[in-house]
Image: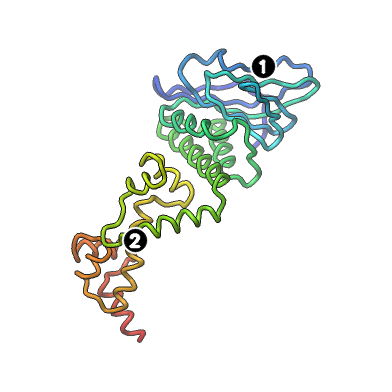
Amino acid sequence: MAWQESKGHFLIFDSRCHIGWGYDSRQPGSDYLCEGRQGLGEQTRVVFQFTLDGRGEYSEKKKSWSVDPGWGLTVMHPSTYRYFLPPKAHWSFFWVIVQHPVVVKRFEELRKKEDPVQPWPIGSRALEAAATLFEALCRGQISNIWDFEERVFAWLWETERELYSRRYPENEQQQLLEKIRGAVLRRLDHPPSVSDLAVLHQMERTTFSRKFKAATGQSPAAFIAEVRLQESLKQLSAGAKLKEIAAATGFADATHFSKAFRQHFNISPGAYRSILGMRR
C-alpha cells in the first residue's frame, strides 16, 4: 500500500475496546518522544510500532534497544518506557494501539518473558497479520467489533506462535510432542488429562493449552485423542474386539470409541478392519 503520513485515527467500539493507528515519518531534528506515563489515559493498552526505514530508540528499566528496519516494539501503556528519535536519525514507522481486555492480558503475559523490541522479518506471519490489520483499518474495512476482534486476535495468535517458536525450535517442539506421547502411552487405558499434563510442565491448564497449541497447531486434548486413536489402529489390525480396544485406549465403551474413531478418521472401525482384510 502507499504510505501517507497520518497523525492517527481511532475507533471506539465500547468502553473496553478501542483501536488507534497511523503512519509517521520523522526527519532529523524532529522533536519526537513518547513516554509511557503520558497520554492515552489510564486503561491499559498494547502499543505496536514497526520500523519501515531509519531507526528509533527504545528504553526501559535502564536498558535500551535500537528499533531498526524490520524490527518492532511492543509495549504496554501506561508503563515506564520511552522511545524517541535519536540525534541525526530519521524514522518511518506504522503503529497500532489496541485496547481489548483479552488481548491486553495475553500481551502482558508475553511481555513478562520477551524483550519489548523484536525482529519481524519479511515472511513473518505475525508481521503479516499486523500489516493486514493496519491495512484493513486504513481501508475502512473494520467497522464493527466483530471485524475488530477477528483481525486483532489473528495478530495476537500469530505473535504468540512466532515468539514461542523462537523459544522452542522445531526439535524442541518434537521433544514436547514425544514427551506428551510418552505420558499418554504409559497410561493408555486411563490417559492423563490436560490438567495432568499442565502439572507435569509446571503450568496452569490454560497457559499450558495455549503454549501447546502455539507450538504444535493443535490443542493438547486433540493430540491426546490422536495418540489413543493411532494406537487403536494397531489393535484393530491385530483383530481385537471393539470393547477390548475401547478399554485398552481409555474410552468409556465400544460406542464411545467408535464415535471418536469415525470423527477422527472419517471411517468406522468396522469399515477400517474390512479394508485391512481386503488388503491381506
Q: Is residue 56 left or right of residue 233?
A: right
**Residue 252, quarter of the rendered image:** bottom left
| In-front residue for pair 236/113 | 113
| In-front residue for pair 24/229 | 229
Q: Which residue is under mark 2? A: 186
Outermost residue, bottom side: 280
Q: Is residue 51 left or right of residue 207?
A: right
Query: Counting other residues with Cα less than 10 Å from the Cα at mark 2, is it few (<14), some (14-19), or many (20 or more)?
Result: few
Select label 2 or label 1 by which is in front: 2
Q: Residue at x 75, y 30 (%)?
A: 54
Q: Which residue is under mark 1? A: 33
Give the mark, 2 or 1, whose residue is nearer the N terminus.
1
Q: Is residue 65 left or right of residue 74?
A: right
Instruction: Determine the CA span between mark 2 and mark 1.
Output: 57 Å
Q: Secondary structure at mark 1?
A: strand
What's the residue type where badge 1 is placed? Leu
What's the residue type where badge 2 is placed? Arg
Residue 266 locus on image (x, y percent):
32, 66
Quadrant where the image shows the C terminus: bottom left
